[in-house]
């Protein structure tokens, strides 16, 4: 009678271990896919920002404006 109880306990431990390993692998697999998609998104953002920085650094300076030769008219206050 004692040997059957020990057998059932060992069978429960083996089955529980197999089910536990299966559940952990399924959960970690979904987490892995989520992290990979986030990684791809971050790589895309990094490349976009690099292009934007490169574009801003290589802009030519704007041409200076020409000076206007406008002279202010003298305003007479009072008479």
Image (cartoon, rainbow, N blue to C red):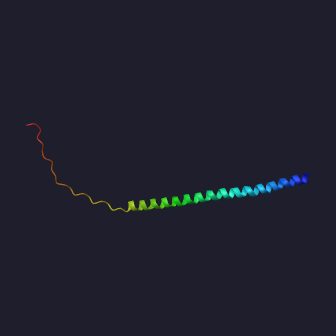
The residue shown at (38%, 60%) is 56
Q: Quadrant of residue 29?
A: bottom right
Q: Residue furthest right?
A: 1
The residue shown at (82%, 56%) is 11
**Image check: 57 left or right of 12?**
left
The residue shown at (15%, 48%) is 72
Residue 79 vs 37, above or below: the answer is above
Q: Quadrant of residue 25?
A: bottom right
For the image shown, how many numbered marks are present on the structure? 0
Residue 24 in picture, x, y percent from top left? 69, 56
Given residues 22 and 54, the one toward you in this image is: 22
Residue 20 in picture, x, y percent from top left? 73, 55
Q: Residue furthest left?
A: 79
Given residues 4 and 56, the one toward you in this image is: 4
Residue 53 in picture, x, y percent from top left? 42, 59
Given residues 46 and 35, the one toward you in this image is: 35
**Image check: 74 left or right of 46?**
left
The residue shown at (42%, 60%) is 52
Quarter of the image where the C terminus is located: top left
**Image check: 41 left or right of 79?**
right
Residue 30 in picture, x, y percent from top left? 62, 57
């Amino acid at each position: 009678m004692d040997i059957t109880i020990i057998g059932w306990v060992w069978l429960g431990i083996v089955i529980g271990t197999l089910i536990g390993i299966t559940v952990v692998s399924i959960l970690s697999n979904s987490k892995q896919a989520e992290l990979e998609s986030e990684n791809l998104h971050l790589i895309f953002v990094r490349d976009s920002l690099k292009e934007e920085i490169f574009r801003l650094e290589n802009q030519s300076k704007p041409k200076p404006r020409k000076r206007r030769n406008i002279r202010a008219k003298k305003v007479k206050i009072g008479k």
